[in-house]
Amino acid sequence: MVSAAPVRLADYSPWPFALPAIHLAVDIRPGDVLVTSRLDLEPRGGAEALQLRGVDLEICSIKLNGDDVAGDDYSYRDQLLTIHSPPSKPFVLETCCRIDPYNNSSLEGLYVSGGLLSTQCEAEGFRRITFHPDRPDVLSRWTVRIEASRASCPVLLSNGNAISEEELTDGRHAVTWKDPFPKPSYLFALVAGELREIRDLYTTASGRAVTLRLHVEEGDEPYSTHAMESLKRSMAWDEQVYQLEYDLDEYNIVAVRHFNMGAMENKSLNIFNSKLVLADAETATDAELERIESVIAHEYFHNWSGNRITCRDWFQLSLKEGLTVFRDQSFTADLHSAAVKRIEDVAMLRNTQFREDAGPTAHPVKPAEYQAIDNFYTTTIYEKGAELIRMLHTLLGQERFMRGMATYVSRFDGTAATTEDFVQSIVDGAAQDGQPLGFDSERFKRWYHQAGTPELTVQRQWDAVKGELTLELRQSTPPTPGQTEKQPLVLPIAVALVGEKGRIGEEQLLVMDGDQASLTLQGDPGSAAPALSLLRRFSAPVNVQLEQSLQESLQLLAHDDDPFSRWDAGQRLARQVLLARASGEPDATVEAALIQALRQRLNAFDGGGGQDLAVLLALPGTAELEALQNPVDPPALYAARREWIAELGRQLADPLNQLLDVCRGEWPQAWPAGQGGRSLTGLAWSWLAAAGDAEARNQALEAVSGPSMTLARAALRALQPMEVDERDLALDRFYQRWQDKPVILDAWFALEASAPRTDGLQRVQALLEHPRFDPLAPNSLRAVLGGFTANVPVFHAIDGSGYRFMADQIAAVDRRNPITASRMAKVFSRWSSYGVDRQSAMRQAIDQLAAGELSSNTAEVVAMLRT
Ligand code: 0A1
Ligand code: ZN
């Protein structure tokens, strides 16, 4: 294993040069690309040598102020170009390098995807294109001239505005782009190839006409409407809510098949994973349509939170990501259902971020060091980062928070900032009204540095005579790797009492910032103890330890006015049921009560707004259940879930069939309408089919050939876990229908790989050799290998065969694409929570991986897993 020296936040110092302007000339030829770069450099004092980053660059020439630099005057080793004695006055450094994007499978820097040349520079990909400091605090104005053959690359795109086009000899042409806004290298982008354009126009609030262009492969044009409409909605929302307008005349989005992540916010030239652009009701599910809308918004919102104000260094990554996730969550909440969105976000947080925070790769929202920054594009940086912004919003309220945002933008526009700059701006802006802040902002900043999910323990006492409920609260955060001592954090805790007729009195916001706090809530004197609605809207990202009786959970489920708390009460009961079943001792009382409560909900439903009911009925995620089991037994949890679904299907057959009748009328409605009906349909098919209902299986089978991708995929999900003929027929029909559409076929690969069959491992192997499987596309890899790890009985086979197989696959992917491989290696992060056999089998698989030659990305993750 190779291990590079870590980069430390504490070692930050500014770059000793300014780089106000960059001119790039990119000459695209059939076998290679020549990149000539002219850097205008201004020494800022203190620098003896000029050091620039460069990876896999073949140097053609290096000139300083027009003269060749002699071989003795520079060196290029260990990915660093050093000019030993640069001038002490401003000078121009011109380098010319040859690069080979045609054999670049890492998908970083410049690479080829389906005949298209495209870039990915965040975080440190620009150094694979030319020599550059490649750090986010060096901002420059860029001019980029791209030259290529018109036949193979009719479309040539980069950031900013196209300022000139040239017709050259030999069928070649060139386009020059100029971006007036200073930006760091990670926001540079270039795309060249044959693409079809979909064009639209947006007029900003102040009257600027912006040309919107979406670029897709030929034949994909009809699937671009949803993305375009989403973009326009995002632009309007940011104007209305944040008073932030778009700042250029052009906005481009390109869809590429081979992409390591979801999408990238390059200034005015977003590059998207094609699965997050191409969609309509026939080809994408409702959930995918909503996700596309939110990712389009996320990348658009980065124009201010990320591009106009960028990060000083990569330790500040959450400055742009946490804030932008918070903004895209608010956008979706405003456009659709705020309650459903909050519930979905919390479910995701608990199942991914809480798991990360409890395992060997736990790290703070602002890490103190890293080896490969690519490993820190995590749910902690993104989703926990967004929760920190949300808490600031909760503590300050909308008006004060927005004043803080305006202060942040006016202070830091055009610069590279830190998370401290952000929090300070928010509190300074908020405090302009002269009112006390209401919390200690220095203590709040601890959230950025402390890893781990806080535990909030609550005890209470009910004084029936006075009608007062007194709460005693304690917080503590369990130790995480490298951080044993933890400090108390600022926790905004929204609470209320709930009686048989709903909420009693007003909601209160307790701001806890020490180890302990107490609070008294006024209820009705002389009555029985009311239910406690704690952490409403999930006002702080913590785990709650509170003893709640079955009766209390049922009361909250039925009468709480906070939809999140109602949902949470239902989830608590479902967790109890599943954990009891997994331990072999089903809890008949809780099961009967929960089924009764669900029956009432189902009976009361008469159509419309079904999404609330659908989230309420959804079962808790596996990760959440695993966090509550010791040792974790994945097959037992899986079996418990399947049995419980079958039980629900048996006991609730009548209301579920009535539900199907009500929902059928909503099937044809176009998203976002009808999604509740379609979700509930999928749920009913799944429960009824598991209970052996042949009619439900038939309905599902038919839907696979129908006009709605949402219903087709719901049908496949319902049938997939069962050994029935309809399952194989359904999967086959889906394959036949969509075999020529890779974006859609990935769903089939994932379902096939996760289908629990006795010959599961051989089948997954066969999928990896399937003619439609593209080993260079991260989407395909994630579909098959991600699907495989979700195949509980096969992946977790007690003999360790699933783990060994996965370790081999990760090693193979690592040789081509370290970013994707190191993300996959995190599937082993739970190894120490399993029973002895699985524990040692998984540990052996990790050691097997560690023994091979790994990229520094994967080596870093594997090293974390082993500590
Ligand atoms: N900044 C992007 C995410 C992203 C990060 C790294 C990438 O390549 C290694 C690509 C995209 C976002 O937040 O959308
Ligand atoms: Zn982002």
Image (cartoon, grey):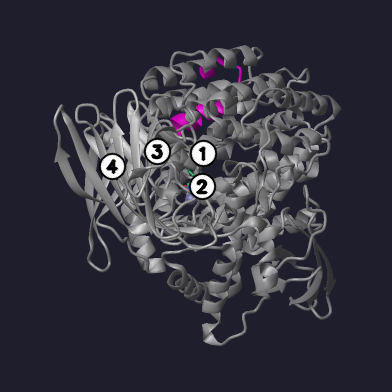
Instruction: Return the residue at label 4.
Output: 157
| Mark 3 or 2, closer to the camera | 2
The amino acid type found where label 2 is placed reads His
Q: Which badge, 1 or 4, comes first in the chain's sequence?
A: 1
**Mark 1, secondary structure of its residue:** strand
- The label shown at residue 84 is 2
State yes or no: discs 3 and 1 in contact (Cβ < 8 Å): no
- The label shown at residue 440 is none
Instruction: Return the residue at label 1.
Output: 75
Q: Specify the principal SS of the magenta part.
A: helix
Residue 81 relative to residue 464: left or right: left
Q: Which badge, 3 or 1, comes first in the chain's sequence?
A: 1
Give coordinates of residue 650: x percent, y percent: 65, 32
Q: Which badge, 2 or 4, comes first in the chain's sequence?
A: 2
Above or below residue 694? Residue 393 is below
**Mark 2, secondary structure of its residue:** loop
Distance between the alpha carbons at the discs numbered 1 and 2? 8 Å
Residue 257 relative to residue 806: left or right: left
Distance between the alpha carbons at the discs numbered 3 and 1? 27 Å
Q: Quadrant of residue 360?
A: top right
Residue 405 relative to residue 641: left or right: left
Q: Is 162 in front, or is 790? A: 162
Q: Which badge, 1 or 2, comes first in the chain's sequence?
A: 1
597 in magenta: no
Badge 4 density bin: few <14, some 14–19, many ≥20, Cα 10 Å: many
**Mark 3, secondary structure of its residue:** strand
The amino acid type found where label 1 is placed reads Ser
Distance between the alpha carbons at the discs numbered 2 and 4? 35 Å
| Mark 1 or 4, closer to the camera | 1
Instruction: Return the residue at label 3.
Output: 119
Distance between the alpha carbons at the discs numbered 1 and 4? 33 Å
The amino acid type found where label 4 is placed reads Leu
